[in-house]
Image (spheres, rainbow, N blue to C red):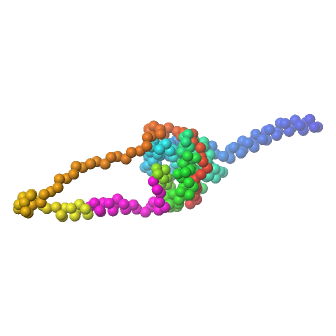
Amino acid sequence: MGKALKGWLWFWVPMLLAVSLLAASSCFAALPRPVGFVNDFAQVIDQRTRMELNGIAEKLRDNQGIEVAVVTVATTQPETPKQYATKLFNEWGIGGSEDSGLLILLSVEDREIQVEVGYGLEGVLPDGKVGSILDDAVIPYFIEGDYGKGLLEGTKAFAQALSGESYSRKSSRNPDLTGFIIFIFIAAFITLSARRSPSGPGPGGPLGPGGTMRRPRPPHIHPMPPTFRGPRGGGGGFGGFGGGRSGGGGAGRKF
């Protein structure tokens, strides 16, 4: 009787363990493979926005060696968006050898966005700054259901911070009047200059009593284009990520 029970245990226990492991693994969806810097698996980003996002990501990679991945999924269940983002970040290897990677993950049905930051960017993008950008530039659009616009404005804000520009806590939905103010100033200056200029020389000629000598116009000097740091990798589109690891930092928001 003891030998029969022992034989039964040796057969069924490994079998039950194998079945349990298979059942557990089937609960977790296989991670998708990256198709580019922008991975719209939930199909919520229009073509024009996708191209803009891709352009921002390419510029960051070529100029600063920073890899950005924008990902949308229907859901991350049974895992939380945070767990899913960390696994996806490490599986794809976003960020290269210096771990300078950034993952922006939107889970549509879970109504949550999660941003994962690589080790090499945690000093530039601390958790508080990531949360501020999400609150100001992303969530207002998500509440209205405009996922593409929210992702675009958020990615722009992250790129601004990564480029060393200060990010101010203001809603990106407010119109930027800087260009309009500059235009008004230039137009007013031209108008005043035209009123002060004579229509022609006076009776005494250009140098006589009634004349006015015009100052020669200075030569027009074209401004030099801005310079950037040398590229860390070649251009030409997406060629896969470089093996970076998540630092565990970042922030998430529900909406």
Closer-to-camera residue (31/166): 166
**Lateral position of residue 243 relative to residue 184, left or right:** right
Where in the figure is residue 18, as x and y percent of width and height? 76, 39
Give residue 245's quadrant in the image.
top right
Range of the magenta residues? 165-187
Where in the figure is residue 22, as x and y percent of width and height? 72, 42
Does 182 lie within the magenta span? yes
Does 144 lie within the magenta span? no
**Lateral position of residue 51 relative to residue 108, left or right:** left
In the rendered image, is residue 113 in sight?
Answer: no
Q: Is residue 171 above or below residue 81?
A: below
| Residue drawn at (84%, 36%) of the image | 10
Where in the figure is residue 55, as x and y percent of width and height? 44, 46
Give residue 112's quadrant in the image.
bottom right
In the rendered image, is residue 147 in sight?
Answer: yes
| Residue drawn at (56%, 60%) of the image | 255
Give residue 92's quadrant in the image.
top right
Closer-to-camera residue (190/83): 190
Where in the figure is residue 20, as x and y percent of width and height? 75, 43
| Residue drawn at (51%, 44%) of the image | 67
Q: Is residue 21 above or below residue 254?
A: above
| Residue drawn at (52%, 51%) of the image | 124
* Image quadrant in which the N terminus is located: top right
Residue, far left: 203
- Total marks placed: 0
Closer-to-camera residue (220/65): 220
